[in-house]
Amino acid sequence: METTNSYLPLLILISPLIGFLCNGVLLPLAYKGFAKTSANVAGGVATFFIGISFIVGCMSFFQLMTQGNENPYLLTYCFEWFNFGGLHIPFELKIDKLSGILVLIISGIGTLIHLYSTSYMHDDECVGRYFSYLNLFCFNMLLLVMGNNLALLFFGWEGVGLCSYLLIGFWYTDSLKADAGKKAFIVNRIGDLGFLIGMFLLFRELGTLNFSEINAMVKSPEVIARLAPSISFICLSLFVGATGKSAQIPLFVWLPDAMSGPTPVSALIHAATMVTAGVYMIARMSPVFDLSELALSVIAHTGAITALFAGSIAIAQTDIKKVLAYSTVSQLGFMFLACGVGAYQTAVFHLMTHAFFKALLFLGSGSVIHACSGEQDMTKMGALKKYLPHTHLTMLIGSLAISGIPFFSGFFSKDEILYSTIALPGGVSYLFIVGVLTACLTAFYTGRMMSLTFYGNERMSHDVKHHLHESPFLMTFPLYVLAGLAALGGFLGVPHLMGDYLGHMPHVLSTWLDPVVPARHLPLTGVKIPLHEGVVMVGSSIFAIFFYFLGVKIFTKVMFLKDVIGGAGFHKVLENKYYIDEIYDAAIVIPLKKISAFSGNIIDKVMVDGTVNGLGRGIRRVSSGLRVLQTGDIQSYGLMMMGGLLIVVFIIFKVLV
Amino acid sequence: MQTNSYLLTWIIFTPLLFAFVALLVPKSLEKHLRTFTLIQTLVSAVIATMMYMNFDGLSDSGQMVHLVPWLPQWGINYLVSIDGISLPLVMLTAFVSPLAILGTWPHGELKKEKFFVCLLMCLQTGMYGTFLASDIFLFYFFWEVVLIPMFFMIGIWGGKERIYATIKFFLYTMVGSLLMLVAIFWLIKTSTETLGMPVASYSELSKLQFAFDGSSLWSALTSPQTLLFMAFALAFVIKVPMVPFHTWLPDAHVQAPTVGSVFLAAVLLKLGTYGLMRIAIPFFPEAAYYFSEFFIIMGVIGIIYGAFCALAQSDFKKLVAYSSVSHMGFIMVGLFSFQKVAIAGSLYQMINHGISAGGLFLIVGFLYERLHTRNLNEFGGLSKVVPVMAIAFMVMTLSSIAMPGSNGFVGEFPILLGTFMVQPVYVMFAGTGVILGAIYALKAYQLVMLGPKTRSDLDHLHDLNMKEVLAMGILTIFVFGIGFFPRTFFGKSDATLNTYSTQLVEKAGQYGSR
Amino acid sequence: MTNDMLLQILAAFLFTMGMLVVLLRRDTIMILLGIELLLNAANLSLVAFSNSMAMVEGQIQVFFVITIAAAESAIGLSIVVNLYRNFGSIKTGSATNLKG
């Protein structure tokens, strides 16, 4: 095939790595004081290299489109990574239709965020370090989506975790921020162990880690029979990895803390790209996941519960970034819900639209924070609309998109998920109800966030107000681009029902993904509950519009829901995130510390060392008993020698002879 | 090839030769002794590189054999050769030695410098000799040679409790090696009875068959093969160290001078696993196989227990020492899994742990040299003051927590994957060591480099000087070089490893499956 | 019982005497004398065997022993003198510095 060894994927991958080396190693070596002064240089270099990735990404995407065969791909074979005794892992990059989309999202949004950061981080003194980390992140993320086998995916998977750690703790002099980074890394590691075990099991059963080989093998009946006993365990192990990286219950706790990183980082890593890696992984391995009904059901339920749970927490938060963080957890739950009912394409669709509007919202919130001199508390904002017109306009679009207001991108993807939960065979009706509830919550807290930030009365301090300013062009430009995408991106996935009315507009994304991610096309009428797709669509739009405006309306006057409808106790629970952090602390962290103190101080010092030293002491005691024999008197030695001699002679003559 | 055959002897005895020269150095030139040592290690490294170039990666048996009769009446010869298993370890020694000298260049005067550098050189001779010996008695000889310089290094230049530590270190190792000596005599005696003449070379001894009866645990335990295996294994697992024989390690590390710690962690611990791999397991495969599950369990306990102990430490050096206990557990697990992939992974891990632990001990040394403390609670926020050291520390931390792309992953991944094929449950437990590893490593990094400063004098800390940067830089290159291109570094070991593990699995297989 | 046998018994007797003196007397001078007895017992035994076996080597050996005995007593006496200088006594019980 003419697609063998295209160099485009390698170019996409290597470019941010070069950027990382430039900012992290070469430029600081080249001239002293680089790290402190040149924000523009560092930002420019970093943006340039990720921009190259984007351009090459577009070129390869174009090649995919023009290749014309059923399942086009671009493949770069780089070198042998592992090759010994049956373990063969080449370092191989592959862009197919699924990873092509992801590459575009990562490098495209990545470029915008690099651009934005150049301005946002302008006054930071470690800007070189910042951009090198950001580039390193892009490298790992691109490796994650382009790696052609599970091991390479794991490489990227761990790599993005590392970059996330480094960037969350970017302002490391604050212990809390450093702690947040550490927490993110460790929680992710717990998930990674699950991932590793899933990978090992798959290797044990199939003898390969290559995606195309795995996905091809699991189609044969004999392999299915062979896998039958372990398949659920495999899928669930892999899903444990996904819960870690994509912040699902029970491993979601790190994501809200991760907001202590710089805001562009939250936009890129903790909204648009890294946290969706779990969804990507499940979509990539969807033929495997399809084999286990149990695992899919667990995934769907976890997703639904997480979505509702995190959405409810978001209502009571006052930190603008925390609201967005919980909103991200909730939206990721939506994606897993989609995966769990078998609607992988829909999950990828929502992944994409979510990347647009959530990156937009985060960058917008960054612009707000920037304008308010670093203030993140929404109770100290209000009525910013007239000060920040561009930020307001773009964020408004983003908020409408996430809320699922008709014809914005979120509407299409969310609606497709909701309908999938009842229309697909894997769906259950109560999942649908949970989904609808979450959608209403989403609209509500997004409305609240907009209202508290941009409308109502001014609550900021005099100082802050004095410094209020709209962000420079370098920051508003990415906002507008993303706003455009968030507004229009949904039209890539117009549902068939609507498409038919619009002159047979196809579901572009679904058609595109069909060869890679097996489709379960939506039937026009529900299976579980006989609801017409149109009914779901119209109903959910009405709910979304109603709750969005309700949110906006209520919170122009008050700041907390409890002030309107009461329930202060429950509100406190929500405000404290259901005390999950405290529970984990008591159930896991403290016992771990106790065990380690016990093994380090008691077992090792007292028991093991005690035994060894006791042995030594015993020998010393015996020998000090024997010391009495050493009189120092030469004649007693002589007597003893004689006695010994007599005994020996006696033995020789009486016993032996 | 006659010219090649002296190469190994050169590698072994070059340090000793330099040590004799160092003894003759007059007092006026003593301040150049360090430079002299550096030159010695570089010369050794060059010879080792020549040896590496000459090494034939396609052959699976010992090469560059050099034989000199020593005690022929007992079959004991001076016999050295190199194959794919000892090759990476020799290269590790050759490259770690100059870096250890560079990285621990004293900032002030050192007492009895001459004696110190002579010990360093003798130590190298011992290490090279142990890895290169092909005669079991010669192996024993060099094994003991290693002990002596280390004993003096800890005992004379150590910290406050150096006497306790050094005696503990010495006694632990002696207990093991005495039993090994007895077992060696048994081996040579048996060879006289069965082959008609005494032999002591690996290749001859591996042909010996020892009775093994695995019908019940008791009969297995009392079989001659098991007794011999246990005698060797005890000596080796003490050195590894395997829990519960590990408590000499933290003490020895904490008391030893930095260069001693680096050698101890990077090379000396590998003597134990090398011995297991070279002697204990292939000579007595049935016994090793029969008891492999026990050793895997002990390895897993070591991984988890070492990690927990590391987590409890506030002494930086002790933390790294316990992390060694944890990481060496992975090698034990891999070796006793009797799986090709995992055995290869174990060999890789020996090298990788040498690099990462060596690097971490160098970092501890840098900090101690500057601040005279190792208490983790007395650092904090150093990243701003000493950015280069922070980067070096981060790299070593990544390597230690087995980040993909760093060398640590190249070792641990095949070990876990290979062992998973036969012992999935233990691997799951071993995997928790990966999580705990991240916890203690990041804890140490945070306490030293991140957060607010705890002391005002931290502001005036010097960053790494050129020598230290060079040492850490080269280690960094190895970390990522091996991480990305393991085939380039370990390709020459393939043939040997392949034959080794095939034969091993075959021999163990004769006994039947567990 | 032949003469040789009697001589051997005498030598054994002398040896036992000397041994008892060495082991039991506390006076170093007496111990030296005891050692002298031991050597001479050995000499007597050697001469007697030499006679009975008709071999001359035993008698040659005796000359060596006598020479050594002379040297020994000289050294032994100087040790006694030193002992007196250092400990103020020539009793064996006074020199017990090596007591454990």
Image (cartoon, rainbow, N blue to C red):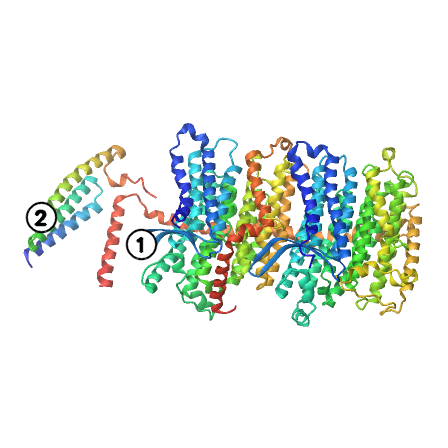
Mark 1: few/some/many CA within 10 Å (<14, 14-19, 20+): few
* Amino acid tagged 2: Gln
User: Judging from the image, what secondary structure is the residue with disc 1 in?
Assistant: helix
Q: Chain of mark 1?
A: B
Residue A58: image location, x then y, percent:
77, 50
User: Judging from the image, what secondary structure is the residue with disc 2 in?
Assistant: helix
- Quarter of the image with the C terminus of chain A in it: bottom left
Q: CA distance from mark 1 to mark 2?
A: 43 Å
Which residue is more in the foreground, B64 or A315? B64
State whether discs 1 and 2 lie on one chain. no
Residue A288: image location, x then y, percent:
71, 65
Quick check: A450 left or right of A626? right
- Quarter of the image with the N terminus of chain A in it: bottom right
Return the mark for residue B72: 1
Query: Is residue B141 among the parts visible in the rendering?
Result: yes
Residue B353: image location, x then y, percent:
55, 49
Identity of the residue drawn at 50% across and 40% down? B98
Tell which tag, 1 or 2, sits nearer the viewer.
1
Circle count? 2
Quick check: A320 left or right of B175? right
Where B471 sits versus A343, above or below? above
The residue indicated by pointer 2 is C59
Q: Chain of mark 2?
A: C
Which residue is more in the foreground, A532 or A216? A216
* Amino acid tagged 1: Pro
Residue B265: image location, x then y, percent:
51, 46
Quick check: A56 left or right of B471? right
Mark 2: few/some/many CA within 10 Å (<14, 14-19, 20+): some
Place residue A174 in its image quadrant. Answer: top right
